[in-house]
Amino acid sequence: MYPTGQQISFHAAVQDPSTMMMVDPKETTQNGGGISQAEFALFTSNRIQSDLEAMGIKLKTHEDSLKFLKAQKTKLDESILDLQVHMNKLNPSGTPRSENCDGNLQGEDINEQILRHANSAAAVLTHVQSRHSPQVTLTKGVVGVVAKLGKVHDENLSQVLSDYLGTRSMLALVCKDYDSVKGLESYDSQGNVDRNAGLHGLGSSIGRTIEGHFDAISLENLRPYVGQFIAGDPQRRLNLLKPKLPNGEYPPGFLGFAVNMIQIDPAYLLCVTAYGHGLRETLFYSLFSRLQVYKTRADMISALPCISEGAVSLDGGIVRTGGILTLGSSDEVKVRFAKPNASRAMDNHSEAERQMKELKQKKEKTLEDIKRTQVLRDHAVYNFGKKKDEFVRFLAQSSSTSMR
């Protein structure tokens, strides 16, 4: 923080007078009853050293204040960013609708969206669960369909996350463990799928045939997130390190991580697996990892230097891992995450706006304090340098006098 790029050493400039001045007492003379030359030199040396020590303490005080203020600004930046993410969840209406957003799906029940894929495993499971007893042995270990296990406040975000995952992943069946996965499908002696057993058998019983492949996810076989959770958050969001550009600033338009923008039913936040893990740190962390969310495609592209595990934007942009960008139009994903009940959203948004205004005022005041403290610190460095130069000249003169 010093102009020269190095810290100023007070000890190098302020030393024991006895080691700096070798004045021979025999050479002391009296000037009209005044003090001797050696005594005057010692007095001057002590005075300058005392001034240097006082200036050093003052400079250190300014340095500490500057360090504290800059740390405070960093915390305010993080709080503002967190609140922006929260406000975006509460009131996404200000975001332009993506051209890929299918208006026909708005307000459509998630079950209806799944049942439109009539010959999918997800549709068979949804039909069975909605028409039959939930205690069907086959489905006991099945948690549900990916699309039904999370909700998203923003329609544009729901659409782009669905595009990112694709229909196959959105319709994947989620099971607690591998034994539950095994119960979904059986094979004959030739390794062919037994259409009369497992989920295929259930499909046949309701007049539906499961076509093609489908994914089944075993939660206990996923590698869960092992970091910290955001303190005091009832949704148990993951405490992920926010991205920063090479200049140390947060990228403009960053809204948060996809894994944390999924709202999960409280019943699935804890102890879904035998190890006590919930859906966020298992299923959704596996699907999204540290996928970043940006307001616009332009914001996302500008942030490429700090995107390592993919990103999406609310206007439909997608960057996958390894520098792969998804271009063109939507793949017509017809299954999206549902939207949670937003009855209290407006009240919460008003409170968030009040908090945002307060945080920005604190940041402005902190920036003013930083500027003022920086000026005081620079002035203290200048004065300390001048006094140090004075001391060096004094030592040189004293040394020259003592050698005569």
Image: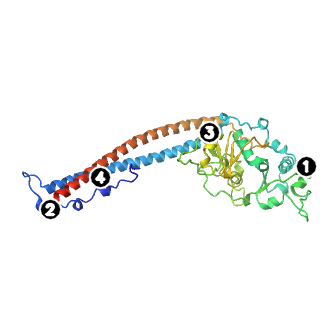
In space, the residues marked 3 and 2 are separated at their CA atoms by: 77 Å
The residue beneath circle 4 is 53
Q: Looking at the rendered structure, which numbered label has been put on residue 87?
A: 3
Q: Residue at the spot x=87%, y=57% of the render?
A: 198
Residue bearing mark 1: 208
**Residue type (three-letter) at the residue carrying disc 1:** Arg
Left or right, 138 with respect to 376, comes to right
Q: Earlier in the sequence, mark 1 or mark 3?
A: 3
Disc 4 to disc 2, C-alpha distance? 27 Å
Left or right: 163 with respect to 122? left
User: Which amino acid is tagged 4?
Assistant: Glu
Secondary structure under badge 1?
loop
* CA distance for labels 2 and 1: 111 Å
Left or right: 362 in relation to 98: left
Q: State the separation of the CA atoms marked 1 and 3.
A: 44 Å
Gap between marks 4 and 3 measured at Cα? 51 Å
Residue 102 picture location, percent across and down: 77, 37
Q: Nearer the viewer, residue 182 or 246?
A: 246
Going from N to C along the chain, the mark reached first, 2 or 1, is: 2
Can you say which quadrant of the picture contains the C terminus?
A: bottom left
Q: Secondary structure at mark 4?
A: helix
